Image (spheres, grey):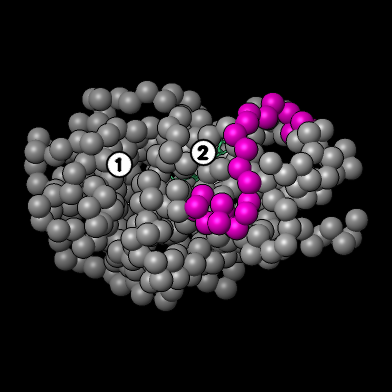
Amino acid sequence: MSQTPEYVILGAGVIGLTTALELSTRYPNSNIIIIAKHLPGDRSVDYCSPWAGANWLSVATDGGRQEGWDRVTYEKFGELADGKGNETGINKVPVRAWFDRDMEDAGVLSVEGEGRGKIWYESLTGLRFVEEEKPEGSVFGFECGSFVVDVQKYLPWLQGEVLKRGIEILRASIDDIQEVFDRFSSVASVFNCTGLGSYNLKGVEDRLLYPTRGQVMLVENPITPMTRMYFRSPQRVNKDTTYVFPRNPGGGVILGGCRVDNDWSGEVNMEFAEDIKRRCCALAPELGRPEDLKVIQHGVGLRPSRKGGARIERVIMGGAVVIHNYGAGGAGFQASWGMAKNAVDLLQEDSKL
Ligand code: FAD
């Protein structure tokens, strides 16, 4: 165990692991350590990443940094899917998305910037509007290029890449961020990637954070092969969201879901699980009948939402640098590489100290 790390990454969810990789790419000779209570393979309601669907379907409409994070990640996922395919757990699969409100009220149009009033990822993803097989009650729909992330493969793959680069991983729970500096006097900067953990982490205690509860289930792949993901919702971000993400090949299919703000419960609601089955089968004909689905696992995760959006910010604490990178909400996978780049960019601010 290195006793002289220069950089500490606090957290080993998708944000912490990606930040560690970005940091080691840009500062290849640096000494980095990850400290985290939970690691890939663990299951806990305090560890969001293993419960994600997950796919790429941007929720950003800010015409600015959030759209930028998703663009960077879309391009990176393209490299990971093309180059390594199944090994990474990232696969290129189109998504068909239906919305039950008018486009102006569906939360898909940029509200600022040059692309104001448009869907910013139209050309990036080859988006086309569709009419065929429109579900009753939907107002409009589109299909676009996307990626499905099999998080059960992707998180261990990220961890493996981290270890290959000589980054150390220490399992520990930190009560107060100051403990990191007390333990390692050599540390130049700490990247705080603790997700919802920053609600209680002393020295941070960010009360802008709140959980957005999601419930999903993993079912066996149906006999009919699935060649696309499905999404249906009144709006892009809405509590009544239904989605079907096949983790091809052979990784099962994720069915979801819901988005319930300020609900800290990690309990699976079995009645609600039946509702998810019904909605998903109505949306994706390949699944067949709800009663025939073979459930492998139910799950509940708490998305680390934050009023005002994710916090990527450099602060000085007791004379040391802390770079926050948390609060990704429901976008932690699809924004991960862009957020990591943004956070590591802030290191260059050191020269201004
Ligand atoms: P986490 O994964 O929670 O990791 C936090 C890390 O910090 C853990 O290692 C934890 O142990 C550690 N930690 C916390 N506190 C401490 C402490 N005090 N001391 C030491 N370690 C600590 N995103 C998408 O992009 N696309 C999707 O389709 C998608 N679908 C989702 C579906 C569901 C049902 C859910 C629940 C989420 C979904 N998300 C999706 C959101 C995504 O999962 C999150 O944004 C992401 O996982 C957040 O990652 P994180 O690394 O910030 O947090």
Query: Is the CB of the residue bearing disc 1 within 8 angstroms of ligand 1?
Result: yes
- N-terminal label among 2 and 1: 2
Q: Please, what secondary structure does the residue beneath circle 2 have?
A: loop
Q: CA distance from mark 2 to mark 1?
A: 24 Å
Q: Please, what secondary structure does the residue beneath circle 1 have?
A: strand
Query: Is the CB of the residue bearing disc 2 within 8 angstroms of ligand 1?
Result: yes
Q: Residue at x 18, y 49 (%)?
A: 221
On the question of residue 106 being in view, the answer is no
Quarter of the figure that contains the C terminus: bottom right
9 to the left or right of 118: right
> What is the span of residues highlighted in magenta in the rendered image?
158-179
| Residue type, numbered disc 2 | Leu
| Residue type, numbered disc 1 | Gly
Q: Residue at x 41, y 71 (%)?
A: 83
Q: Residue at x 69, y 64 (%)?
A: 28
The residue pinned by badge 2 equals: 39
Q: Residue at x 63, y 31 (%)?
A: 172
